[in-house]
Amino acid sequence: MIVEAERTSTTQADSNVFATLRGGGRVWAVAAVRGEHARLCALHARLSRELRPGDQLVYLGDYLGCGAPVLQTIDELLTFRRSFIATPGVEVEDVVYLRGTQEEMWQKLLQLQFAPNPAEVLRWMVDHGIAPTIAAYGGSVEEGQNAIREGILALTRWTSQLRQTMRNYDGHTTLMSVLKHAAFTDDNTLLFTHAGLDPTRPLSAQVDAFWWGSSLFAGMDEPYSGFKLVVRGADRRHGGKVLGPFAATLDSGSGHGGTLTAACFGADGAILHILEA
């Protein structure tokens, strides 16, 4: 069992990595979107009727990739945030975005010129859904492959152009810069992650488990580090929505032919509402 004191000292030391949510109220969590703009709009339409001042909203990562309308998806995330925080009684800190697998890959792609084996890395990223994001920001996989063959200067120009194109879209670069690794309520009730975690390690030692998950997550049979429930928004094994006593998965397959899910958690960690689009 990981002691609570270790978790507290770690999270207080790096607020840029972890977001702290107010305990005692409702928290809405949105599962992995994966570029499904239409589903996100439909879910937001339902959320707009349910959200109220005092609620907090956590997006669990994977906004990019898979679905083609990547730009529209990011714009929708930013637009809905502006609308929600404009509501009297809602604070800027009431909306939190976590870093997902797709966002982690995108950041690595923009530094591809530093990889010792860029061709292999690019192939792996394409296999995991990065191609629509490359296309959205004005590039193509073929251009990247050609740049790799031409050498580091050509590859640097290619990634720099992708980065510059992203800057041309208002708010997109800023959003990528404020993504958190995890979020938790200050009363130790709820912990939100993208793809889960390794329950044998403290938060400070999760490394890539936040984005790639752990095979141990689904079998959690006791609370992690004093939290009543750990919630994740993505499951690489595509096991569907699973609501267990100590761990919950909200990934119902958005971007892979399934729906997009949001769940509302009460002050005691119980699920109050589930929305799908």
Image: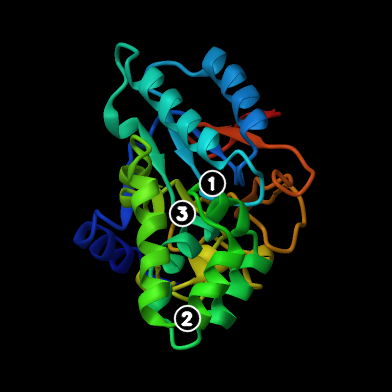
Q: Quadrant of the C terminus?
A: top right
| Number of other residues with Cα within 10 Å of mark 1, as a class: few under 14, some 14 to 19, many 20 or more | some
Q: Amino acid at mark 2?
A: Glu
Q: Amino acid at mark 3?
A: Phe
Residue 256, percent across and down?
A: 75, 49
Q: Residue at x 61, y 33 (%)?
A: 37
Q: Against 117, is 19 above or below?
A: above
Q: How many C-alpha atoms fall within 10 Å of the one at disc 3: few (<14), some, or many (≥20)?
A: some
Q: Nearer the viewer, mark 3 or mark 2?
A: 2
Q: Earlier in the sequence, mark 1 or mark 3?
A: 1
Disc 2 to disc 1, how far (Cα)? 23 Å
Most distant residue in the bottom direction:
116
* Residue in front for this viewpoint, 178 or 248: 178
Quadrant position of residue 205: bottom left
* Alpha-carbon span between mark 1 and mark 3: 39 Å
- Image coordinates for residue 43, horizontal then vertical, percent: 62, 26
SS class, disc 1: helix
Q: Is residue 174 left or right of residue 239?
A: left
Q: Under tag 2, what secondary structure? A: helix
Q: Residues within 10 Å of mark 2 (few under 14, many from 20)?
A: few
Provide the residue designation for mark 1: 136
Residue occupied by mark 3:
227
Up the image or down, 255 lies above or below 117; here it is: above
Q: Please give the name of the residue rendered at 46% of the width and 39% of the height, measured from the top-left corner.
A: 58
Identify the element where label 3 is drawn.
Answer: loop
Residue at the disc numbered 2: 150
Could you tell me if residue 144 is visible in this image?
yes
174 or 59: nearer the viewer:
174
Residue 219's image quarter?
Answer: bottom right
Task: Name the amino acid type tagged 1.
Answer: Ala
Where residue 231 appears, as percent x and y from the top left, is: 56, 50
Q: Position of residue 145 (x, y in %)?
A: 57, 73
